[in-house]
Amino acid sequence: MCASTSTIQTSNKLGVTPLLLEGTEPQRRRYLPEVAAGDALMAYALSEREAGSDIAAMRCRATATEEGGWALEGVKTWITSAGVARYLIVFAVTDPGAGSRSISAFVVHAEDPGLNYGEPERKMGLKGSVTREVYFDDCRIPADRLLGQRGRGLHLALGTLDHTRVSVGAQALGIAQGALDTAVSYVRERRQFGQALADFQGVQFMLADMAMRVESARQMVYAAAARSTARARDLTYFGAAAKCLASDAAMAVTTDAVQLLGGYGYTKDFPAERMMRDAKITQIHEGTHQIQRLVVARNLG
Ligand SMILES: Cc1cc2nc3c(=O)[nH]c(=O)nc-3n(C[C@H](O)[C@H](O)[C@H](O)COP(=O)(O)OP(=O)(O)OC[C@H]3O[C@@H](n4cnc5c(N)ncnc54)[C@H](O)[C@@H]3O)c2cc1C
């Protein structure tokens, strides 16, 4: 399982989902076929340096221009596929002081004037997926790039995350399953004290816990995926719970996999250390696991 590849796909889904949820028919026809054909990639620009978990604190501004379009000004941070994606869904403040209706969403094209990118971030993992800052310097876009209704951006951003957190849960599940498979095959081959590691009860107990974590994550992710497809009312709860449970499972299982491979687990010659580094991001991007717990707690019946 390659976490970089799945991140490219999940961030593309972050860009596509707002169009599916609230895009106009012309907007959907304009962008979705190109993306579905694999000819264009999308990015999702929500986070800022001072607005990560607290996205409502964003400062990036979109101001209506005399020509009837919009001018974007500000900086977005941690944007997956920035500089590679042809289209970006950008969230910006259009109505300061309007509370939950202060933010709107826009489609920005890579070739729009006033759009620039920072250097690639030097990350712990996900080395095959590029992450950059995005700079908007009087970036002018036409009126038909407003996505959904003015002032619905926060609602749209959160509604999008409900669906895409399921995908991060699936990403975490894949990493965890890969780590379990790696550990099982290693302990069956590796011999110490005259027997296979797999024959030690201490190792078996670890494997059993790892397997149960992986299977719990699978069941939760599948339950959430069904709710995403059905656009069920309890998707917010299930999306957050699936991402939280699966990402915590991935972190625990990959850490145990490194342990079971001993010194070899700590080297780049075996895949476990990469899985452990990649598992960490699933507890952070698209909302940290603390934030998922807040969402779960707020959605208890
Ligand atoms: C590799 C990578 C790719 C990313 N891709 C994208 C992308 O494509 N688009 C995009 O918009 N963003 C992206 N992000 C941003 C990501 O979603 C944020 O990093 C994440 O939401 C956390 O925000 P922050 O980094 O500002 O941390 P902070 O919000 O500063 O949080 C720091 C710590 O404080 C905790 N914390 C904060 N608030 C609370 C609270 N109320 N209760 C308890 N604990 C709290 C957090 O859980 C965390 O542990 C990406 C990030 C990374 C690292």
Image (cartoon, rainbow, N blue to C red):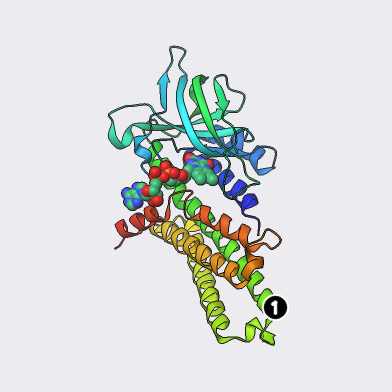
Q: Position of residue 24 (x, y in %)?
A: 50, 35
The front one of 66 and 113 is 113
Q: Position of residue 32 (x, y in %)?
A: 61, 39
Is residue 18 visible in the rendered image? The answer is no
Q: Is residue 132 above or below residue 193?
A: above
Which residue reaches farthest top?
66
Indicate left or right for 48 with 265 as reference: left
Is residue 250 visible in the rendered image? The answer is yes
Q: Amino acid at mark 1?
A: Arg
The front one of 180 and 20 is 180
User: Which quarter of the figure is the N terminus placed in?
Assistant: bottom right
Q: Is residue 189 above or below residue 271?
A: below
Secondary element under disc 1, as helix, strand or loop, is loop
| Other-residue count near label 1 (Cα within 10 Å), few / some / many at <14 / 14–19 / ≥20 | few
Counting the numbered discs, the total is: 1
Indicate left or right for 57 with 280 as reference: left
Q: Is residue 122 above or below residue 234?
A: above
Indicate left or right for 151 with 135 as reference: left
The front one of 295 and 22 is 295
Give residue 87's quadrant in the image. top right
User: Which quarter of the figure is the C terminus placed in?
Assistant: bottom left
Residue that appears at 64% across and 76% down: 184
Q: Position of residue 252 (x, y in %)?
A: 50, 66
| Residue identifier under label 1 | 190
Residue that appears at 47% across and 63% down: 248
Residue that appears at 51% across and 60% down: 225
Give residue 233's quadrant in the image. bottom left
Tell me: is circle 1 under 8 Å from ligand 1. no
The front one of 280 and 51 is 280
Q: Position of residue 46 (x, y in %)?
A: 46, 38
